[in-house]
Image (tube, rainbow, N blue to C red):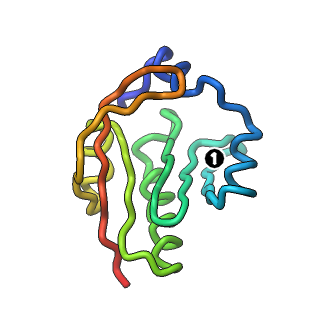
Amino acid sequence: MEAYSLAEVERWAAGLVPERYVEAMNEGGETFIVAAAAGDLVGFCSFKDYEVRGLYVAPSAARRGVGSTMLRQAEAAIAAVGHRAVSASAPPSRARRSMSATGYRVVERRDWRTRGGLVIPVVDMEKMLSP
């Protein structure tokens, strides 16, 4: 499993504080699904409206269905409130490997600037949901 480099992680996480996540849930309407194993957090998926905003699985839990399970749960919640599609963005290698296999199609390729100033390529993707 390909992991982010230390530099990528540090630049992506620049300025993040736990309070931001509490604010996102309480005031921003963002929903978080978390996965744990043996008492340790091994992944999370966050979404708001029809958009998956974050999907992360710890390398120690990779390739065990954790990410796809959380993604299916997010899609079901998005569909349950009446949305007919879900969108997400991801680096191209991760998008091809995980999300394309579950029905997502690439809508656009672009560069994204992290809070720490790192520019990384991403693909914006969309998946039609069953009613």
- Front residue of 47 and 1: 47
Q: Residue at x 30, y 71 (%)?
A: 128
Q: Horizontally, is 75 left or right of 10 in the view?
A: left
In this view, 4 is above or below 46: above
The residue where tag 1 is placed is 37
> Can you tell which quarter of the image residue 93 is in?
top left
**Residue 113 spot, x, y in % from top left:** 42, 28
Q: Residue at x 46, y 51 (%)?
A: 67
**Residue 114 spot, x, y in % from top left:** 47, 28
Q: Residue at x 47, y 81 (%)?
A: 82
In this view, 104 is above or below 22: below
- Front residue of 108 and 52: 108
The kind of residue on which mark 1 rests is Ala
Quadrant that contains the C terminus? bottom left
- Mark 1 crowd level (few <14, some 14–19, many ≥20, 10 Å Cα): few
Quadrant that contains the N terminus? top left
**Residue 7 spot, x, y in % from top left:** 48, 14
**Residue 109 spot, x, y in % from top left:** 24, 41
> In terms of secondary structure, where does tag 1 sit?
strand
What residue occupies the far bottom of the structure in this picture?
131
In this view, 114 is above or below 20: above
